[in-house]
Image (cartoon, rainbow, N blue to C red):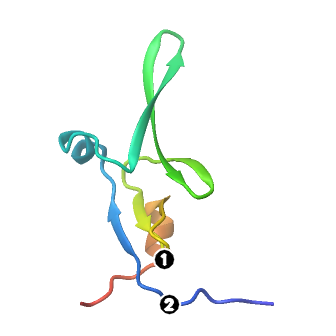
Amino acid sequence: MKFRKKPIVIEAEQFFIEDWVKAGEPKPVYKERIPSQGIVKYQLYIDTLEGRHEVTGGDWIVTGIKGEKYPVKDEIFKLTYEKVKE
């Protein structure tokens, strides 16, 4: 069996680390300190309905049909979504 995704309109914005830091690190993206051989590293993540997912620069943060947020890699976003004319 094959299926096609229903055509729904979503909200999304592309995530850039520099903009996030300048804006005061607003939600829904959080950072977690990761110990790594004496070097301070941070992992950026977003809480989704399926659990915690890593977010990296250039990812899109999509708001789903129930208001949930989740990250989508830029390459997948461009293959899956197209801009809606308003």
Residue at which label 1 appears:
65
Task: Give coordinates of residue 70: x percent, y percent.
Answer: 49, 60
Mark 1 lies on a secondary structure that is loop
Please report the residue visible at 41 percent of the width from the left and 78 percent of the height from the top.
10
Q: Which numbered tag is attached to residue 46?
A: none
Please report the residue visible at 48 percent of the width from the left and 9 percent of the height from the top.
38
Q: Residue furthest front?
A: 66
Q: State the residue in front, 40 or 64.
A: 64
Mark 2 lies on a secondary structure that is loop
Task: Give coordinates of residue 16: x percent, y percent.
Answer: 30, 50
Quadrant (top left, top right, bottom left, bottom right) of the N terminus: bottom right
Count residues near mark 1 (Cα–Cα under 10 Å), then give few for <14, some for 14-19, many for 20+. Answer: few
- Left or right of residue 29: residue 86: left
Q: Identity of the amino acid at label 2? A: Pro
Q: Identity of the amino acid at label 1? A: Ile
Quadrant (top left, top right, bottom left, bottom right) of the C terminus: bottom left
Count residues near mark 2 (Cα–Cα under 10 Å), then give few for <14, some for 14-19, many for 20+. Answer: few
Q: Quadrant of residue 59?
A: bottom left
Reply above or below: 8 against 33: below
Q: Residue furthest right?
A: 1
Please report the residue visible at 18 percent of the width from the left and 41 percent of the height from the top.
22
- Left or right of residue 42: residue 84: left
**Mark 1 or mark 2: whose residue is earlier in sequence:** 2
Reply above or below: 20 against 86: above
Q: Which numbered disc, 1 or 2, marks the residue closer to the eye?
A: 1
Please report the residue visible at 61 percent of the width from the left and 50 percent of the height from the top.
51
Q: Which numbered tag is attached to residue 7?
A: 2
Q: State the residue in front, 61 or 2.
A: 61
Task: Give coordinates of residue 9: x percent, y percent.
Answer: 41, 84
Rounded to the nearest whole Å, what is the CA distance between mark 1 and mark 2?
Answer: 11 Å
Q: Residue furthest left?
A: 22
